[in-house]
Image: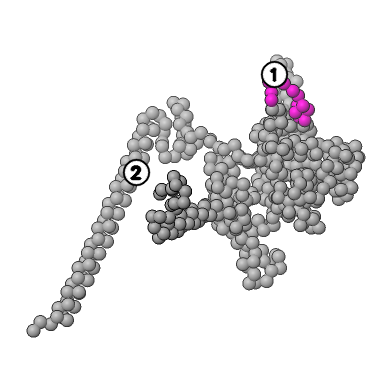
């Protein structure tokens, strides 16, 4: 009599061993395939590099792999100049905000400036007043009104309404060395020597071109700015008392200029213009008229002149000053971790702020905005230093400026499909006579 139990067990064991051998064989086959394709890719890449190397050498371009090293260490006898050009992006311009005294009692001294004497958070006048008056925007007693103004960013030191609409800038000075040439000898021979440099400490003019948004916000800001300068110079309006005591020119700003790499992230060159203020505004051009001009072109694009006092170029302290200014308005930026895109303020921040342990989750979290178009108009700039150079990153709080529009659209589409299916199922359950109007001959609806 056959033992079916033992027989069934043996069949099952044999089947398990068969699948085990099959799995091991399949795993080994995949490993061999991976090793084969990896070796083939390596050989093809090596062949490609050798072919490119031979091609470069054949027309006198030197080596393909280390072009910069070859250009810096060996002589180009044939003048081929085979080197990648210095392609850099035009970069960004940052302008700080002035510290005008736009208090109510000061504004009432000039009937034009009195137009800004409002505390309505919904008005453009109040937003312009905050952009021009930094001490007022940081006043703790006005925190609610400032926070309610949708056209103002209290945590930003940058003059965003003007920055975003600048299209052209020209007039940055070049570095020069002053020389002296002696009178000459008996044979009129002479010699020139270097006697020093002003290091760009002389005033110069910058020409800024703006594209005006609807409503003329840039022209209005410049008109109020220039009117304040004119009024304060004749004593019609006055600066804040602490500015008078410290002899501060409260109507000047600084202009930072960064040239970036093609990825628009790493700073290649940088400069700073200090003590800048507008000296002209082409307001009269808006009133010129031409029979061939239905719309005033001068109101769309205009240029203005800024007088600047000091110019510095590629000085490392400029990057530090940029961060110091950002931290003055957003102190938590000082505790960013440059090695991580997601940053959480840690123990050092808690000690400095007097926070007890266990409240780490209540401190602010930051995230660096990606370099994608979807995250444009998000975050504030801050420079971190990496092995590849200074990185100009834009940081925001987690959840800030995120509306999950793509997720919302997908959910809405699912809801629409679900609603259509629900009505279709209801119609199918009611039968073919549904939506048939029988009381009025000739008006039948056929589906």
* Residue pointed to by mark 2: 45
Give residue 125's position: percent from left, percent from top. Answer: 78, 44
Q: Residue at x 27, y 61 (%)?
A: 27
Residue at 70 percent of width and 53 percent of height: 155
Q: Earlier in the sequence, mark 2 or mark 1?
A: 2
Q: Main secondary structure of the magenta part?
A: loop
Is 346 left or right of 159, judged from the image as shown? left
| Label 1: which secondary element | loop
Q: Indicate the position of residue 439 as horizontal and vertical percent values.
A: 46, 51
- Image height check: is 427 above or below 54? below
Which of 432 and 81 lies nearest the eye of the viewer? 432
Residue 48 vertical position relative to residue 332 in the rendered view, above or below: above
Mark 1 packing: few (<14 Cα in 10 Å), some, or many (20+)?
Answer: few
Residue 189 badge: 1
Return the x and y of residue 310 as percentages of the image width and height. Answer: 74, 38
Residue 117 shows in this picture: yes
Left or right position of 385 against 189: left
- Measured in 3D between alpha carbons, the distance from the residue under mark 2 to the one under mark 1, in whole angstroms, is 63 Å
Under circle 2, the secondary element is helix
Residue 200 picture quarter: top right
Q: Which residues are magenta?
A: 282-294
């Amino acid at each position: 009599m056959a033992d079916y139990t033992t027989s069934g067990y043996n069949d099952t064991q044999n089947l398990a061993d068969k699948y085990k051998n099959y799995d091991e064989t399949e795993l080994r086959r995949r490993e061999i395939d991976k090793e084969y394709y990896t070796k083939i890719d390596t050989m093809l890449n090596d062949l490609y590099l050798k072919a490119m190397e031979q091609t470069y050498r054949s027309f006198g371009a030197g080596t393909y792999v280390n072009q910069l090293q070859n250009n810096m260490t060996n002589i180009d006898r044939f003048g081929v100049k085979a080197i990648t050009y210095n392609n850099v992006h035009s970069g960004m311009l940052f302008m700080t905000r002035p510290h005008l005294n736009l208090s109510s009692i000061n504004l009432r001294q000039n009937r034009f400036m009195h137009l800004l004497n409002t505390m309505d958070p919904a008005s453009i006048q109040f937003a312009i007043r905050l952009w021009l008056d930094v001490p007022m925007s940081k006043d703790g007693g006005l925190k609610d009104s400032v926070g309610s103004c949708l056209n103002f960013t209290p945590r930003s030191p940058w003059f965003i309404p003007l920055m975003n609409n600048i299209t052209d800038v020209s007039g940055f000075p070049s570095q020069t060395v002053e020389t002296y040439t002696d009178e000459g000898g008996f044979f009129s021979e002479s010699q020139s020597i270097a006697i020093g440099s002003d290091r760009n400490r002389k005033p110069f003019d910058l020409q800024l071109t703006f594209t005006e948004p609807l409503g003329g916000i840039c022209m209005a800001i410049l008109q109020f700015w220039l009117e304040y300068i004119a009024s304060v110079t004749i004593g019609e309006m006055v600066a804040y008392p602490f500015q008078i005591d410290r002899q501060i020119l409260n109507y000047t700003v600084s202009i930072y200029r960064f040239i970036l790499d093609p990825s628009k992230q790493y700073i290649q060159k940088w400069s700073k213009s200090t003590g800048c203020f507008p000296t002209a505004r082409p307001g009269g051009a808006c009133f010129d008229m031409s029979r061939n001009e239905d719309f005033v072109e001068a109101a769309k694009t205009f240029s203005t002149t800024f007088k600047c006092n000091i110019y510095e170029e590629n000085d490392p302290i400029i990057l530090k000053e940029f961060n110091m200014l950002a931290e003055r308005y957003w102190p938590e930026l000082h505790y960013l971790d440059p090695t991580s895109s997601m940053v959480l303020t840690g123990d050092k921040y808690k000690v400095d702020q007097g926070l007890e342990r266990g409240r780490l989750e209540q401190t602010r979290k930051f995230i660096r905005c990606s370099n994608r178009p979807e995250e444009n108009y998000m975050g504030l700039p801050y420079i971190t230093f990496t092995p590849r150079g200074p990185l100009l990153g834009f940081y925001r709080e987690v959840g800030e400026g995120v509306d999950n529009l793509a997720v919302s659209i997908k959910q809405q589409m699912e809801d629409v499909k679900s609603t259509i299916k629900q009505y279709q199922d209801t119609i199918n359950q009611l039968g073919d006579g549904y939506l048939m109007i029988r009381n009025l001959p000739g008006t039948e609806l056929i589906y």
